[in-house]
Image (cartoon, rainbow, N blue to C red):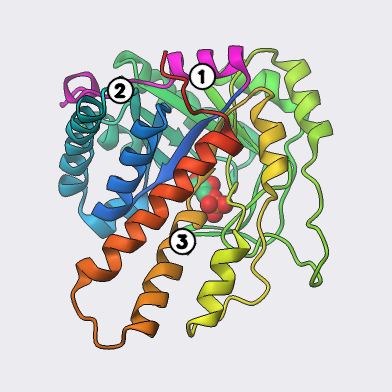
């Protein structure tokens, strides 16, 4: 058993308390490889934003769960180095399992240094969702690890998580779910979705607005309780255009407009999950370089600039979308 506290991580309790009080959201950025991790840590330290490092089951498989844990531990040291070199404060970092699909997976993450886990029983019948979530909470809380549950189903595809249609969260369920399970935060479905194709819109048309009426109802039923938004990438069109220009094909890729997320961040939404935007920024830059410099074969020459692109994007998101910059408490 490795405790996250020994590795320098924090759970999400203080993060959410501060975010709730001050009306911003903590960025939850996914990573699978070194460059993404370096970019997240650099951007969040330089903007002085607390951060949740998200690891999915697929990322654990891709990068190897042992290596990933050491990478995450190394990230804490990297953060300290950047902070000290720039005369900045150290930032709180949580290591979170994204979309845990079993008790065993959550337990394994808790035992290897995660400070927060999500148990996603949203596809299960309500009673079964309550049951599995409560079981994870009981185990996690013994080690002071935070637990995120989910009610409602997001459409879209994200690794093993697939759904054709979204089912909005029913505000009538949230109070009972939170009480019966003891979760520390709740992911809800208000119109966001996973992946790069969130909405079917005609060129020039705006995607439908998020269902802020549902969010408000939820807030009324569980006042002051931290809410999580999954599927919150904006699918930045500059990257979609770059990808298409340099040999890719992502026609029709659309995300959640950033002004909608800004509004959500000012409410009880305390955690905003962003993965696809990072993938798109990285792919766009790599494509541009390989297309315009066909003789280049040193991975540092395309992954390095891709990492810079990611740093700039995350810094801007922290400052302009999540409102998490300069929030080190
Ligand atoms: P996006 O696909 O919108 O980035 O969502 C990521 C997510 O919700 C991770 O859990």
User: Which quarter of the picture shows residue 115?
Assistant: top left
Q: Earlier along the polypeptide chain: callout 2 or callout 3?
A: 2
Q: Residue at x 47, y 20 (%)?
A: 327
* Mark sitting earlier along the chain (3/1): 1
Q: Residue at x 75, y 42 (%)?
A: 168
Residue 133 placement (x, y as % from top left): 49, 29
Residue 232, compared with residue 143, is above or below; it is below
Main SS of the magenta part reads helix
Element type where label 2 sits in the image:
loop
Q: Is residue 245 left or right of residue 278?
A: right
Q: Which residues are magenta?
A: 1-23
Q: In the image, residue 214 lies at what x, y percent?
A: 80, 32
Nearer to us in this view, 214 or 270: 270
Secondary structure under tag 3 reads helix
Q: Nearer the viewer, residue 33 or 194?
A: 33
**Mark toward the start of the polypeptide (1 vs 2):** 1
Q: Is residue 156 visible?
A: yes
Q: Residue at x 71, y 58 (%)?
A: 165
Looking at the rendered image, the disc whose residue lies closer to the viewer, 2 or 3, is 2
Q: In the rendered image, which residue does mark 3 sit on?
A: 281
Alpha carbons under labels 1 and 2: distance apart = 22 Å
Q: Position of residue 17 (x, y in %)?
A: 52, 13
């Amino acid at each position: 058993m490795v405790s996250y506290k020994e590795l320098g991580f924090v759970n999400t309790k203080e993060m959410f308390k501060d975010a709730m009080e001050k009306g911003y959201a903590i960025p939850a950025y996914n990573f699978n490889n070194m460059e993404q991790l370096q970019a997240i840590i650099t951007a969040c330290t330089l903007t002085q934003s607390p951060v949740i490092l998200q690891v999915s089951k697929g990322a654990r498989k891709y990068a190897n769960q042992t290596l990933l844990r050491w990478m995450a531990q190394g990230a804490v040291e990297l953060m300290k180095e950047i902070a000290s070199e720039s005369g900045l404060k150290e930032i709180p970092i949580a290591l979170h399992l994204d979309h845990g699909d079993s008790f065993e997976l959550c337990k394994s993450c808790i035992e290897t240094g995660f400070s927060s886990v999500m148990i996603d029983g949203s596809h299960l019948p309500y009673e079964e969702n309550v049951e599995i979530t409560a079981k994870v909470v009981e185990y996690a809380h013994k080690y002071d690890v935070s637990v995120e549950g989910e009610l409602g189903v997001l459409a879209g595809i994200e690794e093993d998580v697939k759904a054709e249609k979204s089912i909005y969260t029913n505000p009538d369920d949230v109070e009972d779910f939170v009480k019966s399970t003891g979760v520390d935060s709740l992911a809800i479905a208000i119109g966001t979705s996973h992946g790069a194709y969130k909405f079917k819109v005609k060129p020039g048309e705006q995607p439908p607005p998020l269902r802020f009426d549902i969010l408000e109802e939820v807030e009324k039923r569980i006042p002051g309780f931290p809410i999580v938004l999954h599927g919150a990438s904006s699918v930045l069109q500059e990257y979609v255009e770059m990808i298409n220009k340099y040999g890719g094909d992502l026609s029709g890729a659309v995300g959640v407009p950033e002004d909608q997320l800004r509004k959500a961040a000012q409410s009880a939404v305390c955690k905003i999950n962003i993965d696809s935007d990072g993938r798109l920024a990285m792919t766009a830059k790599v494509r541009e370089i390989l297309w315009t410099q066909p003789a280049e074969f040193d991975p540092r020459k395309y992954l390095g600039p891709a990492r810079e692109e990611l740093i700039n994007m995350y810094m801007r998101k922290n400052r302009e979308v999540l409102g998490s910059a300069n929030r080190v408490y």
